[in-house]
Amino acid sequence: MTDFDHNAIDEVLQSRVRIAIVAFLASAGEVDFSVIRDAIRTTDGNASVHLRKLEEAGYVTAEKRFVQRKPQTRYALTDRGRKALLDHVAHLEALLSPAKSSREKRK
């Protein structure tokens, strides 16, 4: 039987903004804060809060530096973050699998 327990779903990835950030970083590699913000179409404050939460969970790393005297923060997905994303997608697929099977049986 499929595990429909809501506790089995990664709470960190339940935010639309956080899942968008993790999915974007999975293909983008290491990128500047503004690139992430623009890609997911959110505000500086919103992106910042969600990136901090992902960093606290160990899903992203942040590298702060100065470029031409301006602060720059670059983010990258960690191995833990990549695994969390893949596990999350696999869990959602497992949840949908019984529904798909029952639809196919009715055809």
Image (spheres, grey):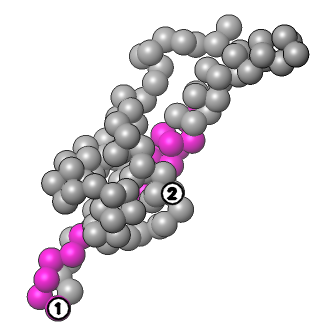
Q: Position of residue 90 (x, y in %)?
A: 62, 33
Amino acid under disc 1: Gln
Dot 2: what SS? helix
Compared across the picture, whether 80 is left or right of 101 comes to left
Residue indicated by mark 2: 26
Return the disc, 2 or 1, that comes first in the chain's sequence: 2
Compared across the picture, whether 34 is left or right of 9 comes to left
Identify which residue, 93 or 60, lies in the foreground.
93
> Is 59 within the magenta?
no
Kindly identify the residue that appears in the image at 51 percent across and 57 percent down: 26
Q: Residue furthest top?
A: 1
Q: Badge 1: few (under 14), some or many (20 or more) residues near its Cα, within 10 Å?
A: few
Kindly identify the residue that appears in the image at 50 percent across and 42 percent down: 85
Dot 1: what SS? loop
Q: Position of residue 89 (x, y in %)?
A: 57, 36
Kindly identify the residue that appears in the image at 38 percent across and 48 percent down: 59
Kindly identify the residue that appears in the image at 84 percent across and 11 percent down: 106
Residue 86: image quadrant is top right
Judge whether residue 74 can be spotted in this image: no
Q: Position of residue 62 (x, y in %)?
A: 28, 62
Amino acid under disc 2: Ala
Q: Badge 2: few (under 14), some or many (20 or more) residues near its Cα, within 10 Å?
A: some
Give, as a single range, the part of the protein colored magenta: 68-87
Q: Position of residue 103 (x, y in %)?
A: 78, 16
